[in-house]
Amino acid sequence: MNQNRKKSITLQAFAKLGNEKLLHRYCEILYKLMGLVVDFISAENESLRLSGGSNFNAYCSAIRENKSGFDACHNCDVIHAFQGARNGEAICYRCHAGLYEVVVPLFDEQKNYLGCLTSGQFHLQNEKRNSPQEIYDLARLYALDPEKLYQAYQNSPVLSQDQLDGTISYLEIIGRHLTGLRENLIFLERINTPGKIESIRKYLEENYTGKLRIRDVARKFYVSVSFLSHNFKRELNVSFTDYINAFRVNKAKEMLSDTRLSVSEIAMMTGFGSISQFNRVFLAETGMSAKKYRQACGRK
């Protein structure tokens, strides 16, 4: 898939994610616990508006109503989202208006940057706050009521260090859910539903001699491990691992009856990691050892 097509599908996937009920539920829980509003900003600066525009911090809302204030906030968001993406880890920073915010960057399984989860805005316990004069200066700059702006600033949520750490951990959980959903949606966009598992099945049969770990196959086909595991079993009525084992044993049976290769050589050529694994799986699949199977075929 070329990069432009993948980017287009990613944007479509995120559009669908904006209506994902569980994702909104996660965000509601954090707001009830901490008074924080969560949003996701894609790598293209598209917002999912997970809060639906409600519960936004009154202090920040007032500043963003002014065009200059909005631009200052937006630039601050972009700069720190880039910093989080560059560092590859969550950051907590103090914004231009004197409140703290969290950025948790998200990446796909190929380490491509997808965007970031943001949570703000809040005071951090025991950290310095803006003085009344600093707030009044901002109010004048953005043509706002100084008293109302200062009151909104003071009323912003306050987080302890433990609460901040918990918030970051919670956002990381939401992030895993978000990226997993994206992978599933991209997979469904790439392959028509009736043929998606068939394509994976063909890939397994063409590459059975190599190492086939479910997480690697899931990554190749842009789907989560849980999605692949569930749908493979549902459509083929056999688990991912059992299918590979059965296919490899069938290939081994052909070699045992048609060639003079040793059992050890056949075990390696059919993708088994060791002779002991081969013997165990072969016995489970056929009810006899490889040696007895060869004898039964008239080979010594």
Image (spheres, rainbow, N blue to C red):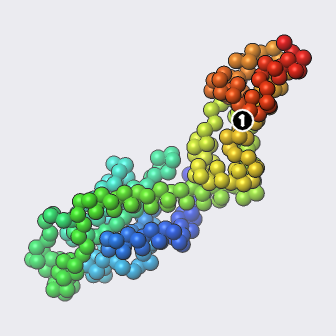
Q: Label 1: how many residues lie within 10 Å, few (<14), some (14-19) or many (20+)? A: many
Residue 108: give x, y in percent of width and height.
50, 51
Locate residue 208, reporting x and y percent: 70, 33
What residue sits 28% from the left and 80% below the top? Answer: 58
Residue toward you, 149 or 164: 164
- The reply to whether residue 221 is in sight is yes
Q: Residue furthest right?
A: 298
Q: How far from the left and from the top, in percent, is residue 40?
A: 43, 65
Q: Quadrant of residue 127?
A: bottom left
Residue located at (41% from left, 79% from top): 53
Residue type marked 1: Asn
Q: Which residue is mark 1?
A: 245
Q: Position of residue 56 (x, y in %)?
A: 34, 77
Q: How many marks?
A: 1
Position of residue 247 in the picture relative to residue 180 (left or right): right
Q: Answer above or below: position of 49 versus 242.
A: below
Image-based side of 43 in relation to 300, left or right: left
Q: Quadrant of the C terminus?
A: top right
Instruction: Tell me if residue 114 can be seen.
Output: no
Above or below for 275 versus 171 = above
User: Which secondary structure lies at badge 1?
Assistant: helix
Front in this rendered view, residue 14 or 277: 277
